[in-house]
Image (cartoon, helix red, strand yellow):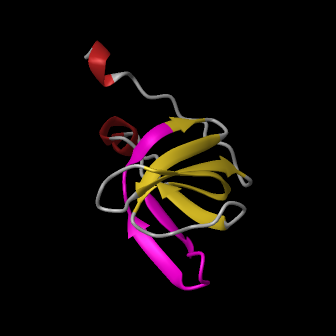
């Protein structure tokens, strides 16, 4: 997923990361940037391999930061966002079910 916004000092950033958790109303991801609760972010989620073969395109939305927690010793943060734009409608098959 790609996340774009401003860090807690107001400096713009853009980062490619992966989701830790994803649902219809929000997502959690790890970032190296210091973002503040209440910050607004732009989020793009690419389709899965099979969805892209069906012609699906990136899902784009906006989100508000509702959680920031320490995640890794390298200073990365686990960030939770609530979608304020379109809701996520895709369904993914569990990798453990494969």
Q: Nearer the viewer, residue 43 or 7?
A: 7
Q: Residue at x 37, y 21 (%)?
A: 94
Give the percent coordinates (x, y) of residue 59.
Answer: 54, 52
Residue at (61% x, 36% y) in the render: 89
**Quadrant occupied by the N terminus:** bottom left
Q: Is residue 62 above or below residue 90?
A: below
From the viewer's side, name the closer residue of 41 and 88: 41
Q: On the rendered structure, is 92 left or right of 81?
A: left
97 w.r.t. 89: above or below: above
Return the residue found at the far left.
98
> Secondary structure of the magenta portion, mostly?
strand
Q: Would you identify the image quadrant in which residue 39 lies?
A: bottom right
Residue 21, placed above or below residue 38: above
The span picked out in magenta is 1-21
Q: Quadrant of residue 15?
A: bottom left
Of all residues, the one furthest to the front in this rendering is 73
> Is residue 57 on the magenta stretch?
no
Query: Who's the residue at 55% across and 85% down the image?
Result: 11
The percent position of residue 98, horizontal first and vertical second, equals: 25, 17
Q: Residue at x 51, y 38 (%)?
A: 22
For the residue pair 48 and 38, the one nearer the viewer reads as 38
Task: Please give the count of numbered marks on the rendered protein.
Answer: 0
Residue 85: horizontal and vertical position, in percent?
72, 55
- Residue 20: x, y in percent? 42, 41
- Answer whether residue 10 is magenta in the image: yes
Say above or below: 75 vs 13: above
Given residues 30 and 94, the one toward you in this image is 30
């Amino acid at each position: 997923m790609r996340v774009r916004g401003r860090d807690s000092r107001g400096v713009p950033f853009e980062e490619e990361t992966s989701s830790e958790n994803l649902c219809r109303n929000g997502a959690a991801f790890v970032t190296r940037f210091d973002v503040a609760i209440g910050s607004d972010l732009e989020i793009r989620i690419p389709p899965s391999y099979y969805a892209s073969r069906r012609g699906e395109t990136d899902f784009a939305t906006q989100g508000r930061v509702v959680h920031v927690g320490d995640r890794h010793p390298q200073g990365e943060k686990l960030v939770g966002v609530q979608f304020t734009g379109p809701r996520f409608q895709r369904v993914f098959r569990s990798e453990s079910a494969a």
